[in-house]
């Protein structure tokens, strides 16, 4: 018995030492990062780009300064305020530059290798998907930091003039680099999933926009909940205010009071960012590991753990007293339902199947919990539902640990709503896959359906009614079933349950159509065959 | 030692590789022959762990391609039928990158790169950009890349495609040299005569089935149950063909011209001598008598139907 325990302990230490060694190899002296870096800095292309970037930054800085300073005509207090604004605009401009440059840097990183067939050469060596993706991440991230450091002449002028302190600059740079990290991870994920560099660039910008629009909306909401956009230093504010790169300077000095402890928001945002990046890279790893089902199982099970931790982090850091979130038990559910929208972005990749992907899949049933982690069509819905469930569990635990609150029935209703929403788009993905031959066409079909059903109705409904999505009065919004982010008050809980039932009914209809199509496809000499990679 | 056991790959109803089995020892240079779509590349990709087998497995020096792919990868050098070179990278940087991902210690990388460049005759191009190399040089660079970690097994998929005759001859010599160094070399190719020159073992694959496997001589002999004899006569070719049909071990005989007869003969050398004696004693004016040498191409054409999947 003692010998067995000793052997198990030894095995654990061996595995830990091996993991440590692999981690060191991946992060320090990563060959992929070194090679990319050599190429990035070769020739005079990068020097020209850097020169242009500096010229634009300094030029824009001078223009903004000229507009804000007006020395001699305004009071010292107004001048001080203007300098603070100047600093905020400079940092916002840096955020905009990073938003534009970062997807371009990493969107083609994997797809170019796939196109020139060098990916096979790399993966015929003892290289893991993690090592490779971390290398790509480092090379893009290093470039981002070069841009940040190059902007120092402009940001330093803010410090010299009195608009900000060096610690503000450092904090802002830290937050900006976190945003760049997320955008890099989004672009890398896209790069592993598409087949052409141009598609990778277009989809990367689209996915970045899909992240930034709600993140910026959340940030704006957080700032409204406090005292305005630019001068929030030293005050308590909801941490999600730091989720947008355009509000970094305002959020840099804020904090959240959790369990009597004032936690700087940059720590909360940083942790959240790293968790999001990890999840995105796990997705990219699954896309890269198409030849290795065991690795897919490992990566998917890890992603479930990270999803739970991510949700727990959000629940822990969401402090109701700092914002207008109101009843946290409802807010938590609403937040989870909102997170389901983010999960929807994974639906095209997780649920679609066809014959032109790296991993060619045939339908092997519509629901099999045994297949939850292996990446086959039958495991798609169980995997998505598992993500919703672990997210709910994480949020429940995180909220309890952070605020001491127990999320109750309304929360459960919103969990059901989130699950129903995800199920509906799973059924749509299955339908498009059954209707179209290629997986890529099927994915585009799902994305188009999301745009038509989710994105486009929002401006139309907003134009039709003056009342907001959160209004308690009966409005035209009540006709719109697919509104996961709305309803942060108890008034909407009953409706959310009714909507969940409606969504499940629609899911059933789409799934039945898909099955009918698949049966017609497979009738005669093409019975459902084994799943093959 | 490379041991391939019942390796199978299936895509839906399509069986790309159907239970291929063979075993190779260090020093073996194995020629993998088959038409396009026969299953060569699929087999090679499964052995290189880039493709998961539907069934069966292969082991290289005890490491299983399914259970321990990373260990297998550290022992193989895979050269696909495309180059996969990076732009804006120098020759030594390209090799340094692969030496690094194959975990060659940093202190040894310089020497390793120099050695493989010397072996592939690319030393003078060490600081050149890879896109500036000729096709033959790029092919040699790819081979050099496969050698940076001193692999036990080299998987070369169509290595000679697109090369000019000189580059092809150089590549042949290099592969032969690698075999002599004790490496297992698997080479797939359409160009059969060149495989026969440097391979000591061949396998013929069609529609996923390994039709023949073994040493070249054995395969050639095994594929021909009869020998083809070529007789040259001053005249009476037709008469001699008719005469020979009644002789023992003559399966078929046909005059292909006024002076030439081809005979399908099932006997051995002694019986060949008897046949000649009969012809001469009957007064046929024989001026030439030889056995047509069968080659790999004959064997390939005889064993395969040309069908693809």
Image: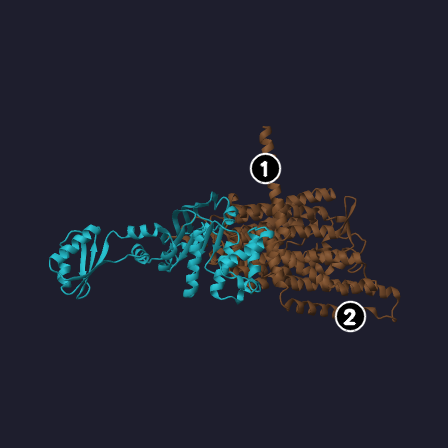
Q: Position of residue B91 (x, y in %)?
A: 55, 61
Q: Across the whole image, how many numbered discs are drawn on residues? A: 2
The brown-tinted chain is A
Q: Secondary structure at mark 1?
A: helix
Marks 1 and 2, how far apart at CA: 61 Å
Tell me which chain the residue with mark 1 is part of. Answer: A
* Residue placed most toward the observer, B187 or A37: B187
Asked whether residue B59 is in view, the answer is: yes
Quadrant in the picture for residue B244: bottom left
State the residue position of label 1. Answer: A11
Tell me which chain the residue with mark 2 is part of. Answer: A
Chain B is shown in which shade?
A: cyan
State the residue position of label 2. Answer: A62
Side of A186 where A122 appears, left or right: left
Asked whether residue A502 is in view, the answer is: no
* Residue placed most toward the observer, A489 or B259: B259
Numbered mark located on residue A321 in the image:
none
Q: Residue furthest top?
A: A1
Side of A222 where A40 appears, left or right: left
Q: Residues within 10 Å of mark 2 (few under 14, many from 20)?
A: some
Side of B95 where B290 appears, left or right: left
Q: Position of residue A315 (x, y in %)?
A: 69, 47
* Residue placed most toward the observer, A110 or B224: B224
Q: Secondary structure at mark 2?
A: helix
- Mark earlier in primary sequence (1, 2): 1
Q: Position of residue A150 (x, y in %)?
A: 72, 64
**Colour treatment of the image:** by chain
Quadrant position of the N terminus of chain A in the picture = top right
> Is A13 above or below relative to B12?
above
């Amino acid at each position: 018995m003692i010998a067995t325990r000793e052997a198990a302990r030894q095995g654990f230490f061996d595995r830990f030492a091996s993991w440590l060694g692999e981690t060191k190899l991946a992060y320090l002296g990563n060959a992929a990062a070194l090679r990319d870096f050599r190429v990035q800095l070769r020739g005079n292309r990068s020097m020209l780009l850097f020169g242009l970037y500096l010229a634009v930054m300094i030029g824009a800085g001078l223009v903004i300064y000229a507009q804000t300073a007006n020395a001699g005509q305004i009071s010292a207090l107004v001048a001080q305020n203007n300098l603070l604004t100047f600093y905020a605009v400079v940092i916002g401009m840096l955020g905009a530059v990073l938003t534009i440059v970062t997807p371009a840097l990493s969107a083609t990183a994997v797809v170019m290798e796939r196109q020139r067939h060098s990916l096979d050469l790399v993966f015929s060596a003892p290289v893991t998907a993690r090592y490779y993706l971390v290398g790509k991440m480092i090379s893009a991230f290093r470039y981002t930091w070069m841009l940040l450091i190059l902007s120092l002449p402009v940001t330093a002028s803010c410090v010299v003039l009195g608009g900000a302190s060096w610690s503000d600059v450092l904090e802002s740079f830290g937050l900006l680099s976190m945003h760049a990290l997320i955008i890099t991870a989004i672009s890398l994920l896209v790069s592993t999933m598409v087949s052409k560099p141009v598609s990778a660039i277009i989809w990367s910008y689209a996915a970045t926009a899909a992240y930034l629009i709600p993140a910026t909306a959340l940030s704006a909401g957080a700032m409204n909940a406090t005292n305005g956009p630019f001068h929030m230093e030293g005050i308590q504010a909801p941490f999600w205010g730091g989720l947008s790169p355009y509000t970094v300077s305002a959020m840099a000095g804020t904090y959240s009071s959790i369990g009597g402890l004032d936690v700087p928001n940059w720590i909360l945002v940083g942790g959240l960012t790293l968790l999001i990046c990890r999840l995105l890279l796990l997705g990219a790893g699954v896309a890269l590991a198409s030849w290795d089902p065991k690795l897919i199982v490992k990566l998917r099970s890890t992603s479930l753990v990270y999803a739970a931790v991510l949700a727990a982090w959000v629940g822990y850091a969401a402090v109701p007293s700092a914002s207008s979130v109101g009843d946290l038990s409802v807010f938590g559910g609403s937040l989870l339902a909102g997170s389901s929208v983010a999960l929807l972005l994974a639906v095209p990749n997780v649920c679609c199947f066809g014959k032109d992907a790296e991993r060619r899949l045939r339908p092997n049933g519509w629901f099999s919990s045994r297949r939850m982690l292996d990446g086959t069509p039958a495991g798609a819905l169980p995997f998505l539902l598992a993500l919703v469930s672990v997210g709910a569990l994480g949020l429940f635990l995180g909220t309890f640990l952070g605020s001491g609150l127990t999320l109750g029935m309304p929360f459960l209703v919103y969990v059901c709503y989130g699950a129903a929403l995800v199920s509906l788009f799973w059924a749509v993905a299955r339908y498009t896959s059954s209707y179209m031959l290629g997986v890529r066409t099927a994915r585009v079909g799902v994305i188009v359906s999301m745009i038509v059903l989710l994105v486009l109705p929002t401006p139309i409904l907003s134009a039709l009614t003056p009342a907001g999505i959160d209004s308690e009065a009966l409005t035209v919004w009540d006709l719109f079933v697919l509104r996961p982010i709305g309803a942060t008050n108890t008034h909407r809980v009953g409706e959310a349950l009714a909507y969940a039932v409606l969504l499940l009914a629609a899911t059933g209809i789409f799934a039945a159509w898909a099955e009918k199509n698949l049966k017609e496809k497979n009738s005669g000499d093409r019975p459902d065959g084994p799943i093959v990679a | 030692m490379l041991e391939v056991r019942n390796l199978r790959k299936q895509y839906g109803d399509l069986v790309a590789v159907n239970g291929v089995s063979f075993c190779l020892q260090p020093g073996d240079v194995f020629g993998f022959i088959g038409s396009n779509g026969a299953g060569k590349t699929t087999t090679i990709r499964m052995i290189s762990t880039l493709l998961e087998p539907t069934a069966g497995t292969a082991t290289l020096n005890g490491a299983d391609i399914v259970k321990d792919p990373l260990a297998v990868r550290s022992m193989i050098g895979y050269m696909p039928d495309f180059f996969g070179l990076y732009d804006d990278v120098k020759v030594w940087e390209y090799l340094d990158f692969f030496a690094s991902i194959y975990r060659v210690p940093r202190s040894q990388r310089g020497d390793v790169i120099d050695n493989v460049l010397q072996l592939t005759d690319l030393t003078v191009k060490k600081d050149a950009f890879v896109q500036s190399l000729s096709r033959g040089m790029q092919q040699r660079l790819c081979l050099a890349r496969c050698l940076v970690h001193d692999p036990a097994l080299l998987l070369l998929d169509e290595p000679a495609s697109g090369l000019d005759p000189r580059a092809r001859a150089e590549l042949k010599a290099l592969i032969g040299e690698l075999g002599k160094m004790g490496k297992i070399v698997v080479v797939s190719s359409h160009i059969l005569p060149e495989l026969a020159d440097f391979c000591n073992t061949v396998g013929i694959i069609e529609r996923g089935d390994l039709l023949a496997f073994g040493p070249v001589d054995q395969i050639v002999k095994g594929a021909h149950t009869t020998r083809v004899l070529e007789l040259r006569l001053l005249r009476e070719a037709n008469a001699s063909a008719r005469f020979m049909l009644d002789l023992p071990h003559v399966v078929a005989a046909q005059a292909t011209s006024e002076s030439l007869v081809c005979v399908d003969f099932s006997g051995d050398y002694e019986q060949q001598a008897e046949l000649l004696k009969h012809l001469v004693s009957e007064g046929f004016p024989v001026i030439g008598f030889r056995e047509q040498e069968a080659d790999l191409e004959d064997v390939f054409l005889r064993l395969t139907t040309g069908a693809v999947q």
